[in-house]
Amino acid sequence: MSLSCSCESDGDFSWYYSVPKDFTTLQTKRRKRCSSCNTLISVGETCTQFYRHRPPKWEIEEKIWGEDGEIPLASMHHCESCADMFFNLQELGFTCIAPDEDVRKLVKEYQAVYLKKEIYHGTRT
């Protein structure tokens, strides 16, 4: 998905996530992969954690979790570098960035589209 300031969808997603408010440290028993750049995050390293859930799919899940229930899924993580880029893009108003998107590509897209004037028409000193 490319950069966008608004989310265009019919609202029918296979899973949902909550956007982290700040950095944390990885508090798992094993290392995790960054869901953006695929690098390993060691236990205790700075990262962000995206809590995920999905709606019930089957009747039995509705009986257990309720019709509007949220079934928890495994969290996704961003390494410190990707988390920093993610927060910066969010700060610029790009709020539709999923945790499994490569934020490095999105930053390059931002530079190419939004900083083009400054790059090509800037003055050299």
Image (cartoon, rainbow, N blue to C red):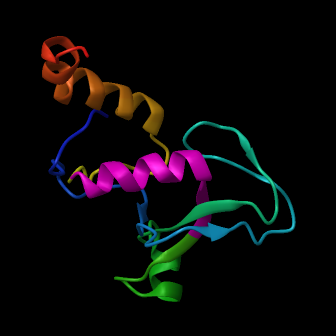
Residue 67, by quadrant, is: bottom left
Q: Nearer the viewer, residue 57 or 39?
A: 39
Q: Residue at x 42, y 50 (%)?
A: 86
Q: Nearer the viewer, residue 116 or 44?
A: 116
Q: Main secondary structure of the magenta part?
A: helix
Q: Nearer the viewer, residue 72 or 106?
A: 106
Picture layout, residue 86 above or below residue 16: above
The region drawn magenta spans 73-92
Give x and y (percent) for residue 54.
45, 67
Give x and y (percent) for residue 73.
58, 67
Q: Nearer the viewer, residue 17 or 122?
A: 122
Q: Residue at x 46, y 33 (%)?
A: 104
Picture layout, residue 65 above or below residue 98: below
Kindly tell me whether residue 55 is visible in this rendering. Answer: yes
Q: Residue at x 18, y 49 (%)?
A: 9
Q: Is residue 4 left or right of residue 59?
A: left
Q: Quadrant of the C terminus?
A: top left
Q: Quadrant of the N terminus?
A: top left
Residue 42, by quadrant, is: bottom right
**How many numbered badges does the structure rendering display?**
0
Picture layout, residue 106 above or below residue 52: above
Residue 4, by quadrant, is: top left
Q: Residue at x 57, y 62 (%)?
A: 48
Q: Is residue 62 left or right of residue 111?
A: right
Give x and y (percent) for residue 61.
51, 77
